[in-house]
Amino acid sequence: MKNNDFIDLLKSHRSIRAFTNQQVTDQVVDEIVESGRWAPTSHHVQAYSILVIKDEERKKDLATLAGNQSYVATCPVFFVICADFYRLKMASEKHGQSFEVGEQEQALVGAVDAALVAQNMLLAARSYDLGGVMIGGIRNDPEAVSQLLGLPPYTFPVMGLCIGYPAQSPNQKPRLPKRAVVFKEQYNQMEIDEAIGEYDQVMKTYYYERTKGKRSDTWSELMAQFLSTPKRPQVGDFLKKQGFISKK
Ligand SMILES: Cc1cc2nc3c(=O)[nH]c(=O)nc-3n(C[C@H](O)[C@H](O)[C@H](O)COP(=O)(O)O)c2cc1C
């Protein structure tokens, strides 16, 4: 692949939520997983696990648990990417060392490792003309998801990933203007407000066209609404139960 082809792949991202019936071969699934395994990892901890789920019933159950997101069931292969310190506990025991994962830092390390793995996997899938979408809804009921998947202590599901051959070709969702998110040398608050105003108009048009006039929300309205209520408070309790964030 030429460099520019790779950049084009990165810049043509859009989430895919509708899939054809075409199956993804085991060989391709293996390549996707291998690509995930080669993600960089904090301190070489490799604090993640990938669960590969093809069983129709299990996908259906996960779709329900993820907030009735039907594409979790209809995608041919669904992955759950977990933060995972279970193996690291074994390493500590093997060498008679205490095992410290109670700081917020280690939960962050696991979540970041998992996210890097997931993005590598999505990009690898796209190189095979597959498409997909990440599923944070997997954290709606982390307890039930962990029961269903047999997750041990010191693990937590970070995200799901639906993969399959696209049966849709949505327009790309516009991103925030560069000046609101990229700063040279130092953070610059001066232009953010104006950039949001500009972006609101772009998103209004995007939603209007995508929904044939049914919606014309601005980005700031949607975000304000989204952040007006606490999100998934159950995640904190689950993390504590699994051995994380026990310390201040
Ligand atoms: C960690 C993560 C979790 C996500 N969870 C969901 C989800 O549960 N359901 C869903 O439909 N999309 C989910 N998405 C997709 C986002 O909604 C999507 O990336 C965003 O709206 C931008 O659209 P685009 O990916 O098409 O550019 C998730 C994305 C990320 C990165």
Image (cartoon, helix red, strand yellow):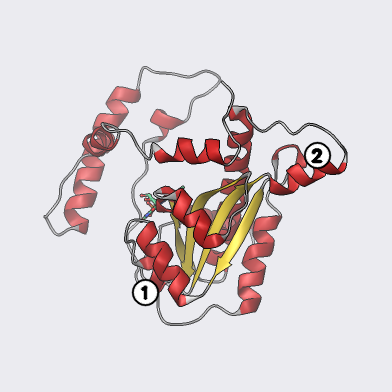
Please state which of the two labelled residues, at mark 1 or mark 2, is closer to the viewer: 2
Q: Residue at x 50, y 75 (%)?
A: 55
Q: Which residue is mark 1?
A: 167
Residue 15, position as x, y percentages in the image: 40, 58
Q: Is residue 188 above or below residue 4?
A: above
Say which amino acid is labelled 1.
Ala
Q: Disc 2 designates what residue?
A: 92
Is 118 placed above or below 198 here?
Answer: below
Is the residue marked by circle 2 packed among few (<14), some (14-19), or many (20+) residues within 10 Å?
few
Which callout, 1 or 2, points at the residue further toward the start of the chain?
A: 2
Vertical arrangement, residue 66 with respect to residue 158, above or below: below
- Asked if residue 169 can be seen in this view, the reply is yes
The C terminus - image quarter:
top right
Determine the secondary structure under disc 1. loop
Describe the element under mark 2 as helix, strand or loop: helix
The quadrant of the image that shows the N terminus is bottom right
Does the rendering let one see residue 122? no
205 sits to left or right of 163: left
Amino acid carrying mark 2 in the image: Ser
Give whichever of 24, 156 is nearer the camera: 156
Question: At x 61% / y 58%, what residue is drawn?
Answer: 50
Residue 190 is situated, as x and y percent measured from the top left of the image, at: 36, 17
- Percent x, y of residue 193: 29, 23
Percent of width and height locating residue 69? 34, 61
Residue in front for this viewpoint, 211 or 27? 27
Identify the residue shown where x is 50% and y is 81%.
Answer: 23
User: Which residue, as the protein is rendered here, is positioned at the far right?
Assistant: 95
Crowding at mark 1 (Cα within 10 Å: few <14, some 14-19, many 20+): few
Q: Which mark is residue 130?
A: none
- Is 215 in front, or is 226? 226
Q: Which of 40 and 51 lies nearest the eye of the viewer?
A: 51
Q: Residue at x 63, y 30 (%)?
A: 102
